[in-house]
Image (cartoon, grey):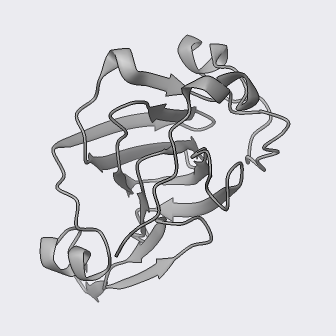
Amino acid sequence: MKATALDIPGVLLIEPGLFHDTRGLFCEIYHAQRYADAGISERFVQDNFSRSVRGTLRGLHYQEPHGQGKLVMVVEGAVYDVVVDIRTGSPTFGTWQGVDLSSDNCRQLYIPPGCAHGFCVTSEQASFLYKCTEFYSPRDERGIIWNDPALAISWPVTTPLLSPKDRAYGTLAAMKDQLPRYRPSTG
């Protein structure tokens, strides 16, 4: 397993060891000690799964309070996955990073609490799995509109399939009173 810190504090790209043979592929998708050694020591309390068709965009989601750290991966198909630092006081506040995740590359992304997360399906269909460090709380659910001009995210679609909720979210600036605070790692 290889863990690479990305530009946003706390965001890690995980590349598990892939073992191919004539039968197909094997990889370890979670091992508590190895992930703790890589800097992900939080306890995961909830696993979620979604399946979406090409052009679906889910996000940009976060919870405040009760922020969720997420370890995400694609088990079928491919997505363009995006994390946005929305933690007030963070040195990278308002910046985003995008990563291609697929069932072929088996890469994972760890998104720390306080960052918004979303993804867009780039294959015919994608099955998406994510582990969360906090339980889903409907009253704490928040979001940023996917096409916020201030963020200028380079999504691979111009007219995505959106849920009514995702379509109604406001800009990062409009959410200024509902954003998490940055807490640097003491680690």
* Residue 21 falls in image quadrant: bottom left
Identify which residue is drawn at 32% across, 34% down: 66
Count of numbered labels shown in the rendering: 0
Residue 175 lies, in percent from the top left, at 65, 25
State whether residue 122 appears in this view.
no
In this rendering, would 173 be left or right of 4?
right
Identify which residue is drawn at 44% across, 62% down: 109
Residue 37 lies, in percent from the top left, at 24, 82
Residue 152 lies, in percent from the top left, at 82, 45
Residue 36 lies, in percent from the top left, at 22, 75
In this rendering, would 87 be left or right of 104?
right
State whether residue 60 appears in this view.
yes
* Residue 164 falls in image quadrant: top right
Identify which residue is drawn at 55% across, 14% down: 165
* Quadrant (top left, top right, bottom left, bottom right) of the N terminus: bottom left
Residue 12's place in the image compared with 176, above or below, is below
Residue 23's place in the image compared with 157, above or below, is below
**Which one is nearer the viewer's eye here, 112 or 157?**
112
* Quadrant (top left, top right, bottom left, bottom right) of the C terminus: bottom left
Residue 92's place in the image compared with 88, above or below, is below
**Which one is nearer the viewer's eye here, 156 or 146?**
146
Identify which residue is drawn at 72% across, 22% down: 174
* Residue 150 falls in image quadrant: top right
Residue 61's place in the image compared with 90, above or below, is above
